[in-house]
Amino acid sequence: MATRYGKYLDENPLRPARDFYRTKRMKSQLEQEGPVFNVDLFCRVFLNKLLHRQVKLPSQATPNDYYMALSHAIRDRLVNRWMKSTETYHEQDVRMVCYLSAEFLLGKQLNQNLLHAGCWNTVEEGLEKMQLGHSLYDLMAQEPDPGLGNGGLGRLAACFLDSLATLDIPAIGYGIRYEFGIFEQVIEDGWQVERPDYWLQLGNPWEIHRPEYMVEVKLGGHTEFYIDDEGWQRVKWKADRTVLGTPFDMLVPGYNTKTVATLRLWSARASQDFNFHLFNEGDYTRAVADKTYSENITKVLYPNDNTPQGQELRLTQQYFFVACSLQDMIRQHLIKNGDLSCFQEKVAIQLNDTHPSIGVAELMRLLVDEHKMNWDKAWTITCNSFSYTNHTLLPEALERWPVRLLSSLLPRHMEIIYEINRRFLNEVRAHYPNDPAKLARMSLIVEGDDKQVRMAHLACVGSHAVNGVAALHTELVKSDLMHDFHEFWPDKFSNKTNGVTPRRWMLISNPKLSHLISATIGKDWVTDLAQLQKLEAYADNPEFREKWWEIKQENKQDLAECIYHQFDLEVRPDAIFDVQVKRLHEYKRQLLKVLHIIAQYQQLKKNPDTDIQAQLFLFGAKAAPGYYIAKLIIKLINSVATVLDEDKDVRGRLKIVFLPNFNVSVGEQIYPAAELSEQISLAGKEASGTGNMKFALNGALTIGTLDGANIEIRDAVGKENMFCCGLDVKEVKALRTRGYHPREYYNDNPELREVINQIACGVFSPDKPKLFQPIVDTLLNHDEYLLLADYQSYADCHAKMLEAYQDRDNWIKMSILNTARMGFFSSDRSIAEYCRDIWHVDPVEVEVPDEQIDIPIEVYCPS
Ligand code: 26W
């Protein structure tokens, strides 16, 4: 399109369009336009922002300038609601949810905020009218993904914020403003290579720096006894370092409500006092080095999912954000209440896994040492304030901090933990007088040469509620992981099955399907997902089925175009889109799928002319940078992809595409286009999974094991509408008890044997035949995750699935029924359950008259 400002279109050297978000979307049909905002006003506001924020005229502006101007214009539309929300909560002194999480995997803000501000159409029209040479979608592509999380846990926190705001729950999320989010993954010669993700490089229009709420955090040093004015013996923590925490706030608008919640992310700064002291001593270089030390605390997100590294910096990060957040809560509480005796009535603090669990000791320290409260009262307040969510059963993922490290970084907390443990073990001993083994199992401390603190025990002891994230997972938490604790406090434990927000995972990511659904059953499903059930009435309607199928085909086409433009790869849109996207971890068993693809390839080689359904296997997965075998699996996936591409016999009928840098935005393109969702973790290992929900909601059918939330999805959609395979938890346990010998499966299964032999002899690595030997070795000698035991079951199930795909009519019906029955898996339902059972918070309506949504603005409009 020739436009007035089009010449600047390609000039953005700093932020390449590394983005997936390029395809044109249809108009969002579900927004609620306010009475004040209109296309002309938007254009004036936008140009005003361009001039006064970016200091650019349209003739000089880069796409990023336009993105920034647009974002500020949209942010302004949310500010008044946001201020009203905070003001309302303050005035009514309401009980607030404080969600503590080391990760928030937000995804792009512009799309979400446009939707929630109700001005998507206006903006789209306005941008067209101005003829800038950039569509709304071009500008959306400018935004880097705020990747402040690794995977499931961080994304859950983001879905929860969306639901909290949408349900009008007074809430604040607390976390860390990492300067570098999850690394960018590029694939070079089939290998994963990590690139730093400096997402803040061009500025973040969505954050508001609040230096006035800066707090101080102490580190290191030692403790001292002293006698206070009233003659009580007390403890003082004499730290040897302090750092400053300064908050950056992000808006979390609810959908179709006035509520805007807050996400407060802490950033570390060097403490001025400390530096002055050194400067005065003339030690300039050390002062500067110390500044770097402080500011490193929030520099980078640890890219490990499910494997702690036990590094001091990581513990410092955890303590830092928790200490900042608790001070912030207490500051606000004291303004309203004068003292802390009713703190527990005003906050519900949720620990998102054990990462913030040092908060239990920190709140005790604040109450006892700083606010001079007696221990018992402080302990009651602490336990009533905190609750803890467990997200993993993997033994290696459970955080334990060395006592040595805790004592040097947080000496006072270590003392407090010992005291908590002493009192706790006394209670246990009173209950089980002659069971030292039980005491050792339940202790917060692992005794021995290298003493450690079990953070899950600290979190459990210091909380009034503990929950798992899917029914099976909670049962395993109760029966295995925390068996003794469950026996001791049965009422503390409950299940809260995860959910996903339908706003991002349908409305934003799948506008076409959203439109069809709204046209069929009305719009209410967006905030009441159970309404999707009404679609069941259309599952046999041929016209509806046809539309349903067409939309899936269009979404596949859109994704195919993306893949073509980004990676120069052609995929057949008539292939079934069979997708596995998630972190790379051995327990998730991407390798099982690879084994099966190789087996299908062998069959094709043997009968090259058989008429088979074309299949596109899409993978997306980041591996932790230090996880050797996971990275080798990525290389294997890409090597098999190359062999398939280069073999003339295959003719595109089996094709693998490994999509690099899987993140929230890439996910938004993938889920709507998927036809088959791969959820094949070893039973008992995946706590819940949430990708499984996004796929099924978007009408993909699932092939999966009886693990995590897959079980509940099967119960909801009906087992005739899902492809279940593999051993269940009981069978896994029985097999291990009998003794698991992977070589037996290798010896007994010729197909499997041939697959493994081919990997072993270098069919997929001709230049380096032994390249994949470590994979072969783990499979044959250990096979920790029972891939070989589940292989045949998976292969049979996959064959059944392909057969089912041939009956298109019935497939569409199953797809419709999957979507129709996913209502339970909304994060709105999860949050409502947390509110009812754990947090005991009620919605608070925020009132903002429509005419006050926009604060009057001075408008400048260049002619
Ligand atoms: C410290 C290393 C570390 C990092 C992250 C240990 C553990 C974690 C997380 C708890 C791992 C995680 O993301 N767990 C996932 O949580 C999701 C949300 O509940 C679940 O859906 C996934 O099944 C679970 O793997």
Image: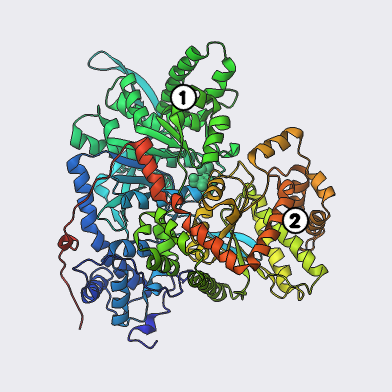
Of callouts 2 and 1, the N-terminal one: 1
Residue 206 in view of the camera? yes
The residue lying at 21 percent from left, 52 percent from top is: 83
Across and down, in percent, residue 400 comes to 53, 33
Determine the secondary structure under disc 2: loop
Above or below, 341 against 853 in this view is above
Closer-to-camera residue (720/634):
720
Determine the secondary structure under disc 1: loop
Above or below, 182 against 170 in this view is below
Across and down, in percent, residue 721 comes to 58, 56
Which mark lies nearer to you, 2 or 1?
A: 1
Q: Is residue 860 left or right of residue 580?
A: left
Quarter placement of the N terminus: bottom left
Q: CA distance from mark 2 to mark 1?
A: 48 Å
Q: Which mark is residue 489?
A: 1
Across and down, in percent, residue 84 comes to 20, 52
- Residue at the disc numbered 2: 772
